[in-house]
Image (cartoon, rainbow, N blue to C red):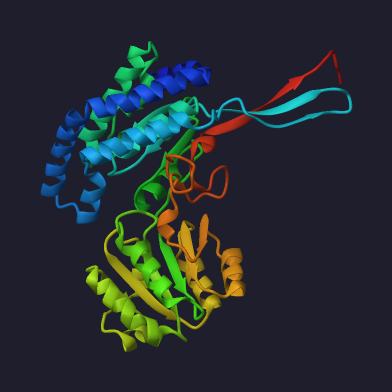
Amino acid sequence: MQQFLEESKKISQEIATLSGETKTKVLNEMADALIEHCDFIISKNDKDMSEATLNGLSDALLDRLLLTGQRVEAMAQAIREIAALKEPVGRTLEGWVTPNGLNIQKVSVPIGVIGIIYESRPNVTSDTAALCFKSGNVCVLKGGKEAEHSNNAIANVLKHVLAKNKLPEQAISLLPDSSREGVAQLIKQDKYVDLIVPRGGEALIRYISQNSTIPVVKHDKGLCHIFIDKDANHSKAIKIAINAKCQRPGVCNAMETLLVHQDVARYILPPLYEAFTANHTELKGCELTREYIDIQCATQEDYDTEYLANILNIKVVKDVDEAIAHIAKYGSGHSESIISENYSMVTKFLNEVDAACVYANASTRFTDGGAFGLGAEVGISTNKLHSRGPMGINDLTTFKYKIYGNGQIR
């Protein structure tokens, strides 16, 4: 492990100084290679899907794992979009001249070696590899065991393109030891690895955050809420709520709890019930909710659960303050939304809710690098420092100061 990471660190110096033109050319070739080897990648994904089905993975997790021709094309398109992004390295972020004539420039530079630990979705392999390469970083990837065949296939296709361009293949690498012990070793190698980005289940995030000696940018669980205010447009609210829960239940920006103002509960809960039932959503509710619709009882544990499935909690609250307090108690700092035509309520919610992304009259499903116009992302950061929300290309750089003098001494 140490020898492998030591080599990654050496390689990072070469990758950091690649020209933007070279990186763009190589990335476009990687996109072409994914399309060219689509059948090979899908054949490996079939093995993962078969094993996952035998191991009883949920439908939502199987959906995250599945690769189709269309999804491989989307992976290739994501790489092309990353290639087309403005060069993130070498940007002058600030510049000034001091009274004694020193010209100081704050310039963006790569972070170095980035360890990315993730689960289920094999497209993360190509997305994060491309983002790291574009930003001049070396990536060490540790995907989930359930996607092992898929991740290896994708990584090998990308590495072949690096070799063809006489670049070190280890610039994009899967962790040689993908066991729990291997991860435990990786997160202690602060001499060679500059940043760890974990994205996955709550237990994984907690373990890495508590044990890593390397700085960590967490991509924690997505315990997202939508609050339907008393001044909400009902048809808009129902449409948004259905989208936030049902369009893709197994992702981190899907809604897990719907909060409803008590003044409109009797009017909006029955049509919401009909709409969710039509989408086969399993509903759980508080006592007040169950006075209006016949559903299961929600427990305190339910409000603290990221289902990643087509299951939803509904809670009736007396006002926006109780909604904000509920989110403060149970939310994960990911994405929260208010549906209201009252400007004062919207402003209060957006100002007071502490989350990476706060919405008014829109689905939480838009918390995504591509939807924000940032291109592909490493994930959704729930940190407050360095990066927050969709972690795009510029969040994979840091900065240094370049100081130009003319003989000044202190």
Task: Judge whether residue 317 can be spotted in this image.
Answer: yes
Q: Residue 286 at what x, y percent from top left?
A: 36, 81
Q: For this view, does 171 lie left or right of residue 174?
A: right
Q: Residue 313 at what x, y percent from top left?
A: 34, 72
Which residue is found at the position 85% from the left and 17% from the top? Answer: 408
The outermost residue toward the right is 99
Q: Residue 157 at what x, y percent from top left?
A: 27, 24
**In which quadrant will I find the C terminus?**
top right
Q: Is residue 137 positioned above or below 73 on the image?
A: above
The outermost residue toward the top is 166
Q: Nearer the viewer, residue 265 or 389?
A: 265
Q: Nearer the viewer, residue 329 or 88?
A: 88
Which residue is found at the position 32% from the left and 29% from the top? Answer: 175
Which residue is found at the position 42% from the left and 20% from the top? Answer: 25
Q: Quadrant of residue 321?
A: bottom right
**In which quadrant will I find the N terminus?**
top left
Q: Is residue 210 positioned above or below 182 on the image?
A: below
Task: Judge whether residue 189 can be spotted in this image.
Answer: no
Which residue is found at the position 60% from the left and 70% from the top? Answer: 348
